[in-house]
Amino acid sequence: MKTTPEITAELIHAIPKSDLHCHLDGSLRLSTLLDLARRDGIDLGAADEASLKALLRAGEPCDDLVHYLKAFDVTCRVLQTEAALDRAAFELAEDAAAENVRYLEVRYSPILHTREGLRLDQVVNAVLDGLKRAERLYDVRTGVIICGIRNIGPETSLRLAELAVAFKNRGVVGFDLAGAEENYPAKDHSEAFRLILNNNINCTIHAGEAYGPESIAQAIHYCGAHRIGHGTRLKENGDLLNYVNDHRIPLEVCVSSNVQTRSAESFERHPFKFYLDLGLRVTLNTDNRLITDTTVSKEYHLAATRYRLSVEELRWVVVNGFKSAFLPFRDKKLLLRRVNEDFDAALEGERQRQADSRRGAARAPARAPSPASPKSAVPADPLDPTPAA
Ligand SMILES: [Zn+2]
């Protein structure tokens, strides 16, 4: 029987992954943020990467979601030209592809990028151009989710929903509602969601992140959300939790971000493993690669170690991610088949690597003058064709 490898950083890097919840304006490279500011003569109040990281409080705990969102005022300042948007989108997909993310949904609110005169359609096209360029170069498929903002009026959400309709089947795969959750109920934006649903467009809503389960119920029952962004506080209502589970509504969990915004008190108190044990369709995502100072691999590694995932649980979370993609069914089926094959190949590669390193460890003492410790010897694997040391 083959041994099951340990879940290591190498294995997590090698397995195919998805990122369904990733904000463009929260996921720039620090170096790019500085470079774009320099090119456009924008004073960000920080001259190097270290001071800029400190200014953004990247990866640090915040008082709450509203506090966390302040960093976006800085990043959005440099994302006001087509060239900047194209570059940010391209680099995001490039960075994701470099860690074996095969499917990436990038979300942002085009209205935040019109301050210097860009039209909404120019904003969308610039981001799509950057993503398509990355798709041609790398093994990654991308889609765009357009976000309405809770704390910007419902009229704007309706305009953004119209934009999503115009770009349906042209790179835009869904619609979302982001921004400050408390005091800004999703049902105020129900007109936008009616338009989205009437046009058979997928939607996801940030809910249960900075407000209780009522917000999740509203997202599902008033706005027809097909997925829930975060859902950290779903655990507070068992009945709704079972509804979400029974209807296989995916949760876009972003563990590090949830701890930073105090949506979860701590990694230990985060409900990720509780949801996983109950069979909820949990997925792992970054939220913001820059502001949260994370990557998809970091999030998987964190979950695997903190919540002691087994390899089969790891596969389950990976598969959940691809199953929950806003993709046509046939495309999803083909992608999932490949993901499972590649997951098996990564597992086999890692099993070999671990076996080799154990054999190396066992051999090392023989080369040394001191006698080998019996504990360092590895039992021979009868299915392993490589001759034992
Ligand atoms: Zn988010």
Image (tube, rainbow, N blue to C red):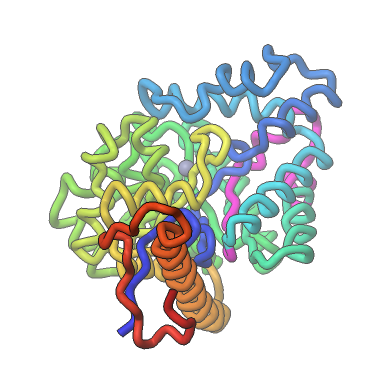
Residue 202 highlighted magenta (yes or no): no
Query: Over which residues does the magenta segment extend?
Result: 102-125
The C terminus appears in which quarter of the rendering? bottom left
In the depicted structure, whether residue 271 falls above or below residue 78: below
Q: Is residue 387 left or right of residue 94?
A: left
Query: Viewer-proximal residue, 327 or 299?
Result: 299
- Farthest residue, direction left: 238
Instruction: Tell me residue 78's x, y (percent).
Output: 74, 29
Instruction: Tell me residue 317's x, y (percent).
Output: 37, 64
Report whether residue 323 is seen: no
In the depicted structure, whether residue 47 falls above or below residue 345: above
Residue drawn 42% across and 78% down? 388
The N terminus appears in which quarter of the rendering? bottom left
| Residue 232: quadrant of the picture | top left
In the depicted structure, whether residue 132 falls above or below residue 67: below
Residue drawn 26% across and 51% down? 307
